[in-house]
Image (cartoon, rainbow, N blue to C red):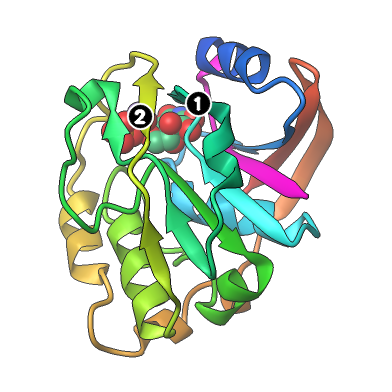
Amino acid sequence: TLQIIIPYRDRAEHLKKFVEYYKGFDIVVVEQYGNKLFNRAKLLNVGFNETTDKIVCFHDVDLLAHDLNVYKTPFKDTIHLSGLCEQFNYKEIYATCFGGVTMFTEEAYLKCNGSSNEFWGWGGEDDDLYNRAKLAGLDVQFNPFKYYSQKHRKQTLTRQYEVNKQLCTSTDKTWQNSGLNSLRYDILKEDTIFGVKRILVNI
Ligand code: UDP
Ligand code: MN
């Protein structure tokens, strides 16, 4: 079945709404412990590593699909779903935008070595995941569906953002060096939050 994996820290209102809206879905919340810059992509890797489902859905906590049937869209390796978001007036941002909500088969996510673990702070990790998916020869499908956006402040851009832009894999093989094969983390606690499973992790 489909496993929804939510990268999470300190967005309780959004998460509460999310689990109500996605009642009946299999959800795991991967919460980053501590005050380091948020690392969305590494949390996705942890979620993938800690579950055993054939299909995973990496899902921002603030996005709610207009139509819950979009998760039944057939795809081969990976698919991007959240192409039309309320926060952008339901306009496509750019053609290869791969953030927000994606689904992968287990096999496909393994094949691209997951996501990079090196993206701290906002930005770049989604483009990098798109690039490594292409470099690994995956079929990358785009089906832009409508999503409501729960409101939040924009994460402050740190100097790290410039590093992230440099890190973005495009043509080389660096994607093979950081990812599922180099993933290190400590699970501090496993419990439930708003009725769904939570893994608190030090990354
Ligand atoms: N996120 C979180 N806490 C944070 C930052 C990010 O839980 O402090 C998670 C959350 O799932 C969020 C996703 O990472 O939806 C992407 O971050 P954000 O919404 O800030 O990115 P943007 O809306 O700018 O794409
Ligand atoms: Mn957001």
Q: Which residues are magenta?
A: 1-12
Q: Secondary structure at mark 1?
A: loop
Is residue 12 among what the camera can see? Answer: yes
> x and y percent of residue 120 in the render?
37, 51
- Are the residues tagged 2 and 1 within 8 Å (C-beta)? yes
Q: Nearer the viewer, residue 129 or 155?
A: 129
Q: Which quarter of the rendered image does ligand 2 occupy?
A: top left
Read off the residue under disc 2: 146
Apparent side of residue 11 relative to residue 145 in the rendered image (left or right): right
- Can you tell which quarter of the image residue 185 is in? bottom right
> x and y percent of residue 139 in the render?
43, 74
Neighbours of disc 1 within 10 Å: few (<14), some (14-19), many (20+): few
> x and y percent of residue 23 in the render?
72, 20
Is residue 203 among what the camera can see? Answer: no
Residue 107 vs 162, above or below: the answer is below
Apparent side of residue 202 relative to residue 188 in the rendered image (left or right): left
What amino acid type is highlighted by mark number 2? Lys
- Is 135 inside the magenta-drawn segment? no
Read off the residue under disc 1: 67
Q: Nearer the viewer, residue 148 or 159?
A: 148
What amino acid type is highlighted by mark number 1? Asp
Residue 189 is marked as none
Residue 108 vs 66, above or below: the answer is below
User: Measuring 40% from the left and 80% from the top, which residue is drawn there?
Assistant: 175
Ligand 2 within 8 Å of disc 2? The answer is no
User: Measuring 23% from the left and 78% from the top, which residue is drawn there?
Assistant: 170
Apparent side of residue 173 relative to residue 42 in the rendered image (left or right): left
> x and y percent of residue 133 in the render?
41, 74
User: Measuring 50% from the left and 19% from the top, which residue is drawn there?
Assistant: 11
Q: Disc 2 versus disc 1: distance between alpha carbons?
A: 8 Å
Q: Secondary structure at mark 2?
A: strand
